[in-house]
Amino acid sequence: MSKLAIKNLTKKFGGFTAVDDFSLTIQEGEFVALVGPSGCGKTTTLRCVAGFIPIDDGEIILSDKIISSKKFMLPPERRNMAMVFQSYAVWPHKTVFKNISFGLELRKTPKSEIRDRVMRSLELTKLKGLEKRYPNALSGGQQQRVALARGLVVEPEILLLDEPLSNLDATLREEMRFDLREIQQKLKITSIYVTHDQAEAMVIADRIVVMKDGKIEQSGNAREIYHYPQSRFVAGFVGTTNLLTGTIQEKNETAALLKFSEGILMKLKSSETGLMPDIGSEVSVSIRPESILLQKDKIEAAENVYQGKIIGKTFLGDTYDYRFKMQNEILRVQTTSHQEFEIDSEAYIYIDPQFCKYVEK
Amino acid sequence: MRTEITAKHTYRLDLMKWFLFPIGLAAVMILVVFPLVRMFKGSVFTPEGQLSLVYFQNILNDAALFEAFKNSMMIAVGATLISLIAGVPMAWAVSRTDIPLKNFIRNFTTVSMVTPPFLGAIAWIFLLGPGSGKINVLFKNLFQTNITLFNIFSLEGITFVISMYVYPFVFIYTASALDNMDANLEDAANILGSSKWKTAFKITLPLVAPAIISGAILSFLEALALFGVPAVLGMSRGIFTLTTRIYQLFNYPPNFEQGAAMAIPLIIITGILLIFQYMYLRKKQFTIISGKSSQPMLIRLGLAKWPVLAYCLLIILLSVIMPYSMLLLISLSKIWGAQLSLSNLTLDNFEFILFRYSLSQRSFFNSFFLSFAAATLAVILGLIIAIYNKRTENLGRRFLHYMMVLPFAIPGIAMAVAFLWAYIKPPFNLYGTIWILLVAYIARRIPLCYMNCSDAMGQINFELEESARILGASWFKSILKITIPLLKLSLVSGWMLVFITSFRELSASILLYSPNSEVIAVTIITLFEEGEFEALAALSIIILTITLFFIAGSRKLVGKGVAQVS
């Protein structure tokens, strides 16, 4: 049984369609991340699920009960969900304890039980000892933990997280990612996480849903999304990539030969997900910069070896980011930071056909 | 655990939101719509019920009425000019230069803003009255002459006194714009080779121009709306303004229709200028309020700092120190006019005012009661309407909003005219009771509370309320448990502001009071007309003390609030 089902959700703001015929099913205990650029509809989707905004079409179903439809919206307070906001939204006039106990008080939980449960969630979120403080005496990271504890303590059916880490500084953000994942795994709480940061989504989520223009672009686990992008958009949005366009010259069941404008030929293996289009049709290929082998001397391989010139280099600490020009195509190539090439020097690259990913759209 | 979903639940929630509407609607009907409609109707119908524009034509044709209109304009324009000459350099000096005593200057500007101008006018009579005004006497003795240096009972006198109490608008707007201006904007000019003085005129001045204009508009409107100063300094000499003429039209011989017609241009001018100010500021001010990113470099004035400081102190001397000292001196004198000596000092005047004079006791009680009730009701109603407008999407909220800001454009005396028209006859006959004063006070000050609440609510991140909702609080409960506690400081400071401005309210009270519902400001005017200057001064000192006490308290609160919330 699915925990939450979003069916054909559509939400318009005036003439602008923020969420467009969006469908998604989430299993009990699953941690799903909605990722996409700003304006892709991810936050709107989340707010529809929370019941803050009515929907124009479709249905949202929680544990087999319709909670939002075209005609009906169960108010947020009756959905038994919890939400962590980007601004933390920790109440400044309540102590940490009172912030966390608020949801339990609304549920008329007995006093002694409130105390126990608040204490437990303080422990879980590493906030023990801070319960008497007011939020203005807490750091950003601590405030975000209070917001999380406040949500967890009511044992919600769904935990919603709206860019919860984007106000934190970089190191703290990284640390909190792992903490969040750990807590979610421990409690097995069904969660929806909205972020524009694909790296964050990869760390945190069981499943990543990439959104664009109010629609699902691709959905899958981190590996699938990264290695088998189904669209140019996903390939470009999740990590860096080289996107090349060419026409199919030859093909069989396992491989195809692609021809680029300047007569470069490239072999690629069939994708796991789809069939190759017919000979003569134009297709895109995604090649991750770290999948390209760069060498000074000619590489011995049957295919996909190209000669070219280094035209740019950037030292990034753990890697070098080179710009490699072969005829009219420029590729980004990543090597270890020990592989030195001079600008303007000649070099060779080899791209294993299995790393040349055919992109459907 | 699971919640059963029924239509009843959602229906009940909507009901809670709608519940606020009838309260808000009743409030704006009683306080704003009904009085204004009555007054407008009154101005276009003759007592016989004939539709007529004769009362408006009279303003242009009747020499006395036109004169009043002209005088008001001259006073307002003059006071605005003086306000600019006084306020802008002072603001620049305290915000951008290295003169000493900056806090002293800022605080005394606030004192001058909260001083009831009619008290200033009375004090200035003792300084610049033609016969026995201290400065005039000094001048005559010093130069052995019979020439009067300056007669305060004149258009110039009225303009001067008013400007001393309206210049703070220019000062405060300009100073806060300068304080909040991003200093990088000036640094950028300096680094390109502009001198400090050149930067001040080419960069700083244009950037704060919208704030200066805004302040000037408010000074102008306040000068136009004031009743007390022209009443004290003009009426006895036959100098009338719009406000004092309106007052006359409701006395002897009464002409209610003409009074209503006179009030309308006052409202229209105010309304147009406020709308202009709002639109203009909205378009322009984004350049300035980019937040304070760095401390500006103060301009070192060198020796020039002393004349600049002297200029600032002169304004403070004229607006606060001299009039206050004068009133204090008179309040402590047995007989005003006798030689200054220790034997002439007494506290009898205070004793008389507080314990022996029944009119002042009664008016103290009335003013306390009215201010307390008006402040409490204005805060509650302002809050309800602000919540309805800001936190629901229900019908009618824009209407309530406009009706709440409309009284901003209605000067006190015009408000009194409207209330007379509305509540002097059945079905709502409140005239002759204290209740007509109460509704008028609420109507005059509710915009303040409403805007105070509304602005504060605009600064509350709505996620604070949403997080309460999703944790199980109903809409009403999230307002009750989250929003209102967060607004507490704004509510308290709004309450204090209404209390203190109502406590010395004059321009509406003067038309609406009746025997037994006298208020303090009316008593002061009565004492003035009876020539009881010592008692009057004692009463004035008491009011000023209470005023300053409250203002200091509310400023402390607001300062604390800002620190706490952010």
Image (tube, coloured by chain):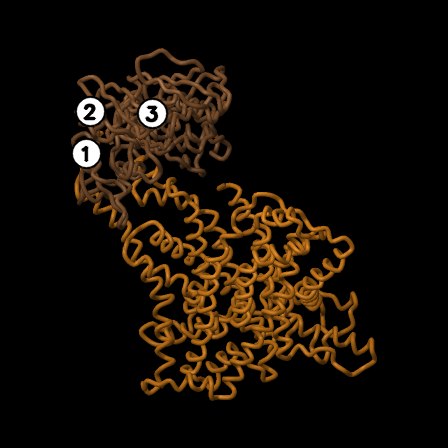
Give the mark toward the camera: 2 or 1.
2
The image position of residue B457, as x and y in percent, is 41, 48
In the rendered image, is residue A165 in sight?
yes
* Among numbered discs 2 and 1, the one appearing first in the sequence: 1
On the picture, is A332 further left or further right than A353?
Answer: right
Q: Which mark is residue A25?
A: none
The image position of residue B243, as x and y in percent, is 51, 76
On the picture, is B524 further left or further right than A195?
Answer: right
Q: Residue at x 48, y 47 (%)?
A: B489
Q: Residue at x 81, y 82 (%)?
A: B145
Q: Which chain is represented by brown in the image?
A: A
Amino acid carrying mark 3 in the image: Glu
Return the chain for callout 3.
Answer: A
Amino acid carrying mark 2 in the image: Met
Relative to residue B43, is residue A295 depicted above or below? Answer: above
Return the chain for callout 2.
Answer: A
Relative to residue A163, is residue A264 depicted above or below? Answer: above
- From the image, tell me which residue sits under label 1: A61
Amino acid carrying mark 1 in the image: Ile
* Among numbered discs 3 and 1, the one appearing first in the sequence: 1
**Residue placed most toward the observer, B209 or B116:** B209
Return the chain for callout 1.
Answer: A
Give me the C-alpha separation between circle 2 and circle 1: 37 Å
- From the image, tell me which residue sits under label 2: A276
In the rendered image, is residue B347 in sight?
no
Element type where label 3 sits in the image: helix
Give me the C-alpha separation between circle 3 and circle 2: 60 Å
- From the image, tell me which residue sits under label 3: A113
**Residue placed most toward the observer, A172 or B389:** A172
On the picture, is B127 further left or further right than A193?
Answer: right
